[in-house]
């Protein structure tokens, strides 16, 4: 069999990979064209043919309110005739390799084949759900409030989105080209919400397509709210009841707070679990340094972290005045993380010491574990962005 090589794609191999992805997925993948100016494409070649590949985006993700350089991997595939030989694992490693050299200290991947991602060190900080609710139920439960709706995205609304994204662990700090890419890809319609005489407080993006029998199918892609006024967006969606029987919130579109569920009189709502986004720490000291930390926390905790080869390294984590550093030490750790557990902790996925222990985190000191959990739970994990 011809030898397999992994290489960055030139123009010809971009075209080959586009054709391969269409064959492997069963439909065209528009991102391969749309992201060509912004993404890195690595491919596997055998006998002069592209047989696997995938895109890598170097963007920032917010953690603790600070942007952290991330290698976001998407649109990967393996030729059907090459499957079953663990090529996806080798291809993912090859896709990731050039991005830390350009500054990435963490990496995020979204894949339905979570097993191989876990073997390579990624882990899911939280579950991901899509929601569907009858539009008539929204109309009965969310009355029209004193709010104004305007169509279109403005600079003010983009600033709002970035400010709100900082309040979660995981959202992409969207670069200037991001919005145009999403608008072109999904044909999004965006609305801004504000109380009379006040600045924009909520931002909603949706897409519609003709229903096969009557009306439209409506899917929400962006749902950004500064607080309880999210009810204004739900009331607005309820106004579509004559055209759309159901409102679907795309996977991850709804942030993990209970505005929708608590506002419904009856829980006639469907939740569908999707494959999660998964996080991996590439450079532990830099990932710790660049992340945001609670300004009121001062502590030093010795921890042990399992390395990629299975050995345990001893580290001292020091947090003070909203900054942190982690350095090697000889002090025995009071809490032990695997690399995957470290990623969950980094994203604030352990909401209590109980959830950490139930996930297998070992601690000889309950106090030390409580301090560590508290240090990353100021914000909750949520990644509404897709790539």
Image (cartoon, rainbow, N blue to C red):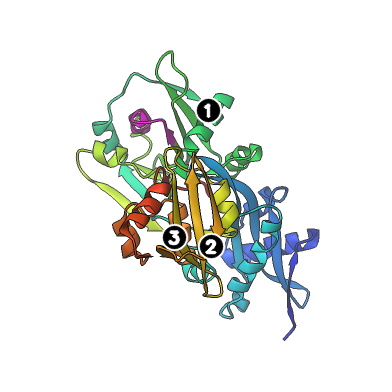
As drawn, the label of residue 275 is: 3
Whether residue 288 can be seen here: yes
Q: Are marks 2 and 1 in contact (CB under 8 Å)?
A: no
Assign a secondary structure to mark 1.
helix
The residue pinned by badge 1 equals: 157
As drawn, the label of residue 329 is: 2
Quadrant of residue 232 within the rendered picture: top left
Question: Cα distance, mark 2 to mark 1?
Answer: 46 Å
Residue at figure coordinates x 62%, y 47% from the top left: 59
Looking at the rendered structure, the number of numbered marks drawn on it comes to 3
Where residue 113 sits in the image (x, y, percent)? Answer: 49, 68
Where residue 128 sits in the image (x, y, percent)? Answer: 40, 54
Q: How crowded is mark 2: few (under 14 residues within 10 Å), some or many (20 or more)?
A: some
Where residue 289 sits in the image (x, y, percent)? Answer: 57, 48
Residue 230 falls inside the magenta stretch = yes
Q: What stretch is highlighted in magenta?
A: 224-238
In the rendered structure, the answer to whether residue 137 lies left or right of residue 379 reads left
Residue 265 falls inside the magenta stretch = no
Look at discs 3 and 2 and give the one toward the viewer. Answer: 2
Assign a secondary structure to mark 2.
loop
Indicate whether 52 appears above or below 292.
below
In the rendered structure, the answer to whether residue 272 lies left or right of residue 91 reads left
Question: Cα distance, mark 3 to mark 2?
Answer: 37 Å
Residue at figure coordinates x 74%, y 81% from the top left: 3
């Amino acid at each position: 069999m011809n030898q397999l090589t992994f290489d960055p794609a030139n123009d010809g191999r971009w075209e080959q990979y586009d054709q391969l992805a269409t064959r492997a997925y069963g439909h065209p993948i528009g991102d391969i064209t749309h992201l060509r100016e912004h993404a890195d494409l690595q491919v596997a070649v055998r006998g002069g043919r592209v047989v696997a590949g995938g895109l890598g985006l170097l963007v920032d993700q917010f953690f603790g309110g600070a942007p952290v350089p991330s290698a976001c991997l998407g649109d990967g595939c393996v030729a059907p005739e090459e499957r079953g030989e663990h090529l996806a694992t080798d291809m993912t490693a090859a896709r990731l390799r050039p991005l830390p050299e350009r500054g990435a200290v963490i990496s995020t991947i979204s894949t339905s084949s979570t097993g191989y991602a876990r073997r390579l060190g990624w882990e899911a900080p939280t579950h991901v759900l899509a929601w569907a609710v009858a539009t008539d139920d929204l109309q009965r439960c969310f009355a029209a409030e004193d709010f104004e709706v305007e169509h279109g995205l403005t600079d003010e609304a983009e600033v709002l989105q970035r400010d709100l994204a900082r309040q979660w662990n995981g959202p992409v700090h969207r670069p200037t080209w991001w919005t145009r890419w999403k608008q072109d890809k999904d044909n999004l319609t965006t609305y801004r919400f504000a109380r009379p005489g006040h600045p924009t407080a909520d931002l909603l993006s949706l897409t519609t397509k003709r229903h096969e029998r009557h009306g439209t199918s409506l899917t929400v892609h962006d749902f950004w709210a500064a607080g309880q006024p999210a009810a204004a967006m739900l009331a607005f969606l309820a106004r579509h009841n004559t055209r759309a029987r159901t409102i679907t919130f795309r996977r991850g579109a709804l942030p993990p707070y209970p505005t929708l569920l608590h506002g419904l009189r009856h829980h006639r709502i469907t939740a569908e679990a999707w494959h999660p986004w998964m996080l991996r720490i590439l450079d532990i000291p830099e990932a710790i340094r660049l992340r945001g930390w609670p300004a009121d926390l001062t502590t030093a905790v010795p921890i042990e972290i399992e390395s990629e080869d299975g050995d345990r390294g001893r580290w001292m984590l020091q947090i003070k005045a909203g900054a942190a550093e982690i350095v090697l030490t000889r002090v025995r750790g009071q809490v032990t993380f695997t690399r995957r557990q470290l990623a969950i902790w980094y994203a604030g996925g352990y909401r209590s010491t109980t959830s950490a222990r139930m996930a297998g985190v070992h601690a000889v000191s309950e106090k030390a574990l409580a301090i560590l959990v508290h240090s990353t739970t100021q914000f909750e994990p949520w990644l509404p962005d897709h790539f």
